[in-house]
Every structure is written in structure tokens, then in C-alpha cells.
Amino acid sequence: MHATVQAPTTKEQRKVILGSSLGSVFEFYDLYLFGSLASVIAKQFFSGLNPTTGFIFALLTFAAGFIIRPFGALFFGRIGDMVGRKYTFLVTIGIMGLSTFVVGLLPSYSTIGIAAPIILIALRLLQGLAIGGEYGGAATYVAEHAPQNRRGYYTSWIQITSPLGLLLSLIVILICRQITGPAFDDWGWRLPFLLSIILFAISVWIRLTMEESPAFKKMKAEGTLSKAPLTESFARWGNLKIVLLVLFGLMAGQATVSYTGQFYSLFFLSQVLKVDPSTVNLLQGGALLIASPFYIVFGILADKIGRKWIIMGGCLLGILTYFPIFQALTHYANPALERAQNSAPITVTADPNDCSFQFNPTGTAKFTSSCDVAKQVLTAAAATYQNVAGAPGTTATIKIGELEIPSYSSQGRSPDDAKKKEAEFKKAVSDGLAKSGYPTKADPAEVNVPMTLLLLTILILYVVMVYAPTAAMLVELFPTRIRYTSMSLPYHIGFGWFGGLLPSIVFALSAQNGNIYFGLWYPILIAVMTFIIGAIWLPETKDVDINAIK
């Protein structure tokens, strides 16, 4: 017979649960700060690359922190199941906080050369390692304090830390932009990282006041702690099959929906539609303010009707509406671009054998063919184009409306000649785009703020649906003795790999295909996979007694 953990009733116990959530806000502030400043990071640390490759590399550096998160989940999950939840909290917050602060002090590429991006990537890996142990501990800790019939509500406070962390980062960035003005891209971007030391100190204090989870203390007193949580979690088929089901039938689709709504929408507005960064931050911040209270609403709803179909519903809505929503963002945020696309469509006619895949994550590949040169220039201008197969051996040609511009190959040219030819070609394309009405940036007077805000809010509401009930569901699928380890790995593979790589994958797919919307197929197809697997095999867990799971 297992004792049921009672709902916390004292002021001190309520503070412990709230403290866990507030500490996580800082973790997500650190995480999202880098993503929000990806374009500035590209200029500071990858200035030795061309702008398109530099931005992709910045996105991949952002993703590097996600890639390592599953390893952090294994390392800290094991500690959390063997030593305790509170101890693990303090270690993860320390690594995360100090790594973020050091980014604000790191010299740029122009100062120390290749050492700058190498150190930056190392810091991102440390951040990712720390957050790999953060979420599982926070979700487990709160759920093990929550009453049986209110677990969805209590853990929704952990889920709301993600948008609150993003909102806080956007507010700090906006204030720093206003204070530093044009100098923000030079040195002002460092301030949000340096100011994080204040949040770090507050978070450490909060976590020092926290008590250990009652469920963990009970296991420790009874001597029933797991001696090999990794083996029990992943080497025994009974638990491993649940881990795999959670990864593909829950976390993969949930992660891509989350990062499409919260991150790719930011990149799309700022990098593709060329909307002013301050405007983008205000719009995204407004959408987060509107949508965030619904985390609690859906947490309460999950306690009443269940977790599964709320999550599956969010995936399905993303599948059905991503293309029309992002097309509508173009219509309302940069209507001049939409008009130009309709009145002066662009084609690239080239020998298919002359064209390479445009994704260059290392920045070492040199694209010298006439086809590659043409596509690089159009991608940098965020111009949508169609590919037309040309005769073998012919030079690629860009056609903007009725205007034809022949490309060139930089292969075999001297550095000076190649640089001169590049400048001439870019000017010809830029002039052609301008004459055909293609804007170099979105006109602030033409941005339809209410409709753009509405569309961003809808995207974030999808995030709320898939994310709000997740912590409760994850906790309810695994036994207490290996809960921290078991739930952390699929969560961080889902968010770290399927989600963390999303911005760079979507950006690169769109650049290669020539269609600014083409990359959306990635989150849509992943969400389709999760919806099918989850709808058929994922169990409903609303009424599970987490202390009775074996």
C-alpha cells in the first residue's frame, strides 16, 4: 500500500513550489536570450562568413545547446534520482547562470578571431547540459508535491516559465535597444547577458530555501532509491518502450509546434519579412502576454478532461494551419513583399548539375558556380523564386518579372576580380528587385499590427495546448524511483533535437528550395508523426496514482 502525497497547505510548502517555477523562469531567460539575438550573434561571432551562412551558423550554435541536452538529462537525471531533486537544482542553475554571464564578456570574432565562436559554442554546450537536468527536476519536484486531482494545474506553473522566460528576455532586449540605440549591435547586446547575474543571484537564493521532494525523502527513508536509474530506465523493455512512445508520440511533435510558434515566427518576421527587430519583439511580447494565462487554463482543463487530446489537438491545428498563417504574416507584416512576389515572380534558370545544396553548417564550403551564386544572392534578399532546369553547361540566369540578369561563376577568378564581379552582380540584382517593388525592409507604416499580433497569438496558443499538460503527463508515465531520469531523456531529445534544430533546418530548407514557406514542411511532418502515434498508442494518464506506478 502506497501513501498518497497530500497537497501542500502551509505557506512554506506553497513557496517551495512557486520557487521551483520562478527558478525555471531564469533558466528559460538564459536559453531564449541567445535565440532572440541570433542575428546579432551572427555578426559578432561569425563575421568571417557570408551573411546567410553566418546566420545559419548562429542558429546552429543556438541549436548546439539543445543537441547536448539529452546528455545533461542522463547525467543530472541520474543524480536527481540517486542524490535528490534539490541538490540537482542548485548545480544546474549555477552552470547555466555563470555560462550566460560569461557570454556578455566574450570578445568578438574581430578581436580574437576563431577563438570567439569556439568559446561561444563551448558556453552554449554548458548551458544545454545544465538545462538538460533542469526541466525533469522541476516537473518531478512540483508533481510530487501536488494533490492527485490538481497535478495538471500545479505543473502548468512549470510550463508557463517557458513563455515568461522568453517574454522577460524580449523586454530586457527591448529596453537595452532603446538605451543603447545604434550601438546595440556593437556592444549593447552584451547588457542582457550581463544583467542576468541579478536573476542568477535571486534564483540561487530561491533554490537554497527549497525543501526536498516528499516522495524522494520517503524513498530515501525506506531505502528504496534506485541504485542504477539508467539501467532501470533504458535497459529494461517495460520502461524503454514507454520512453520511445513518449519521444515519438508526444515530445517530437510538441517540440516542433513549440519552436515554430515561439522561435521560427521570430526569425521569419525579422530575417525573411525584414520587420524592424524592436517591432518584432514588441509583437511577440504582446502575443506572449495574451496567451500565457492560458497555460493555467489548459492545466486546469487537463485535470478535468485529460492531457492527451489537448496535446494532440495542438499538433493537429499546427498541421492544418501553418501554411496559411505564415502566408498571412507576409500579407499583414510586409504587404509590399507579397505584392512584388505576385507582380514580378522570380525564376532561376540553371543547369541542375551546376546547383549545390545551400546548407553549409561549417562555413567551409565555397559555392562558386553560377547557380549557387545566384541562389545565394536571392536568399540573402529573402526573395522567393522558382527553379527552372536549363540546358547543360549554360550559365544561370535570374529573371525578375521581365528583367533577366545573367549570373557568373567565381571559380578561377583572382580574389580582386571575384570581389569586383560579386559587387556588380549584387548591385544588378538589388536594383532589379527594387525596380520590381521588392522591399529591402518592411515599411513600418504598412505593418498591420493588430492582425500580425493576432496571428502570433494563435501560434503561441498552439504552443500552450501542446505544452501546458506535458509535465503532468510525463510524471504520470514513470515510477518515482526512476522518474527524473526516464522523463528527462525523451523530453530533451524531443525539445533538444527535433525542436532545437528546427530554426536552422527550416531556414536552410527554405533557402535551398527558393520558397520562404517550404521549410514549414519540417514541423508539419513531425507533428503528423506524433499525432498518429500519440492518438493510437499514447495512454491517458489523468487518473494515475504516481506513487503506485511500478
Image (cartoon, rainbow, N blue to C red):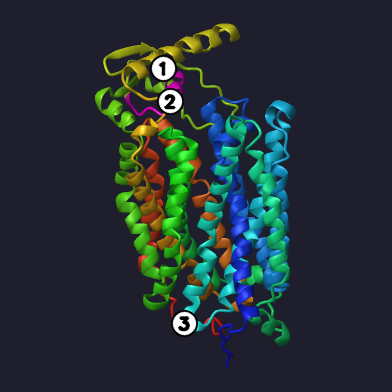
C-beta proximity under 8 Å, tags 1 and 3: no
Q: Is 115 placed above or below 294 here?
A: above
**Which amino acid, mark 3?**
Asn
C-beta proximity under 8 Å, tags 1 and 2: yes
> What percent of the width, then of the height, locates residue 435?
33, 16
Q: Which residue is mark 3?
A: 149
Tell me if I can see residue 485 in this picture: no
What separation in Å lies between label 3 and label 2 (alpha carbons)? 53 Å
Which segment did they paint magenta?
Answer: 372-387
What separation in Å lies between label 1 and label 3 (alpha carbons)? 61 Å
What separation in Å lies between label 1 and label 2 (alpha carbons)? 8 Å
Counting residues from the start of the chain, the first of labels 1 and 3 encountered is: 3
Q: Quadrant of the C terminus?
A: bottom right
Residue at 71% x, 87% y: name it.
Answer: 222
Label 3: element kind:
helix
Counting residues from the start of the chain, the first of labels 1 and 2 encountered is: 2
Q: Which residue is mark 1?
A: 430
The label number, if any, that marks residue 381 in the structure image: 2
> What percent of the width, then of the height, locates residue 257?
42, 54
**Which amino acid, mark 2?**
Ala
- Residue 413, picture quadrant: top right
Residue at 69% x, 41% y: name it.
Answer: 104
